[in-house]
Structure formats: structure tokens, C-alpha cells
Image (cartoon, helix red, strand yellow):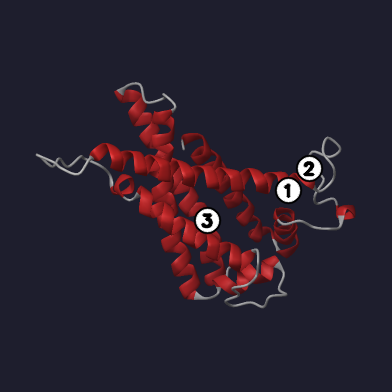
Amino acid sequence: MAVTGLCLIGFLLMHMYGNLKVFMGPEAFNHYAHWLKFDPDPSDGIDVILYPLIPNGWFIWLFRAFMLAAIVLHMWSAITLWNRANEARGTKYVVKKTLEQTYSARTMRWGGVILAGFLLFHLLQFTALMVTPGFSANATPYEAVVGSFRLWWVVLAYALWMITVTMHVRHGFWSAFTTLGANTSAKAREVLNACAWVIAILLYVGFMIMPIAVLMRWVN
């Protein structure tokens, strides 16, 4: 759970950085978006990462397989731990105790379910191009992003989704490093908590700059 969670946080940071390429113009953003997908034309140099160590074009598929495995293992770990907790709890209580927890900690499980649902929508929107609010199915990645985030309700839905994402990340980051043995003292706990907040705020601001800029017509 901890290792796969940190892998997913790393991907979010990379994806956030890639989204900021929209400010560099259509050519730069489309190049990045085509790299995220598989471009069948190897002559354009998009899919040459780790070539010739691995065949040209293989990296993106290996990367996708790795990320899919991380998501599946993360969900499997969550379900397994949830079931173990329910089995250990039993059915009868003499005294019901309420632990002091943050809102993020109390909503981690359902937050994960919400994230999975919106991730599916996100893939259908920008990868499969099956849900196309504000743009056509044959639009370029840049046109799809600009057309979609010109709609205020899409930006609002994205903002709410990112709140869920960053809440999940904030607690997940702290919990992951605690599981891995970094939470060894009160000082270490403060540092971990501060780092978790920094990562969460960075992700929220970084992901929201682009859609807000598009909505405000700062990106044409």
C-alpha cells in the first residue's frame, strides 16, 4: 500500500509538470500528450526513451503496465486491509471509542473510490475521447484541453476532484512514510506532516493553474 501509493504520487507530480506545458503553446503540449499515448510513427523521435536498451516505442507501454499494476495493487491492498480491519473488529463492543483523526484519514477509503471513478472519466475524456465536452473527437490534445476547460462546470468538477486527490495524497504521503518506518519521533512526525501538506498544496495549485488559465482566457 505504501510503496504503490508513493509511486502514484510520483506520477501525479510528473503529470502536473506535463500539464504546465500548455503555457508553452500547442506544439509543446501536443508533443507531450503524444508521448503519453503511443505514436505509431517512430521517425518523429517521440518514443525513443531508453532506446536502444529496449526497442523503440516500448517504454510507454512498459510505463503504462507499471502504473496499471501500481493502481491494481494499491486497490487490492486497500480492500485487503479493510477486510482485515473488519474481521479484527468483531461485532460486539462494550465501549465505543472515537479516535482523533483528520478528515482525510477518515475518508481515505471512500476517497479512493471517488478517485477511481473520476480517473475513469478522465481517461474517457482525454485518452479514449469518448466523453468530449467542449471539443470534438478529432481535436488535438491542446484543442481538447482548451475546449473542455472553457466550460465552467468542467473546471468546477475538476477543482472538486483535485480536492479529493490532494486530501488522499496528504494523508497517504504521511501514512506511507510512517509505514516505512520514518515516523520515529515527534520531530519526525512534524516533518512528515509538513512535507505531506507541501506535496498536497503543490499538486492542487499545479493542477489548477492550467484549467483556471484556460477558463479566464489567459490561454488561447
Instruction: Specify the quadrant of the image occupied by residue 29.
Output: bottom right
Instruction: Determine the CA span between mark 3 and mark 2.
Output: 25 Å
Earlier sequence position, callout 1 versus callout 3: 1
Q: Is mark 3 on a helix, strand or loop?
A: helix
Residue under the point 43% across and 50% down: 166
Mark nearer the viewer, 1 or 2: 1
In this rendering, is residue 185 above or below 159?
above
- Amino acid type of the residue tagged 3 in the rendering: Phe
Q: Do the numbered discs 3 and 2 sit on residues whose CB atoms are within 8 Å?
A: no
Give the camera-side residue of 191 and 6: 6
Q: Name the residue under label 3.
A: 207
Earlier sequence position, callout 3 versus callout 2: 2
**Whole-percent x, y for residue 104 in the image:** 33, 48
Give the camera-side residue of 172 and 202: 172
- Amino acid type of the residue tagged 2 in the rendering: Ile
The label on residue 60 is 1
The label on residue 49 is 2
Residue 177 left/right relative to 53: left
Residue 197 seen in the current view: no
The label on residue 11 is none
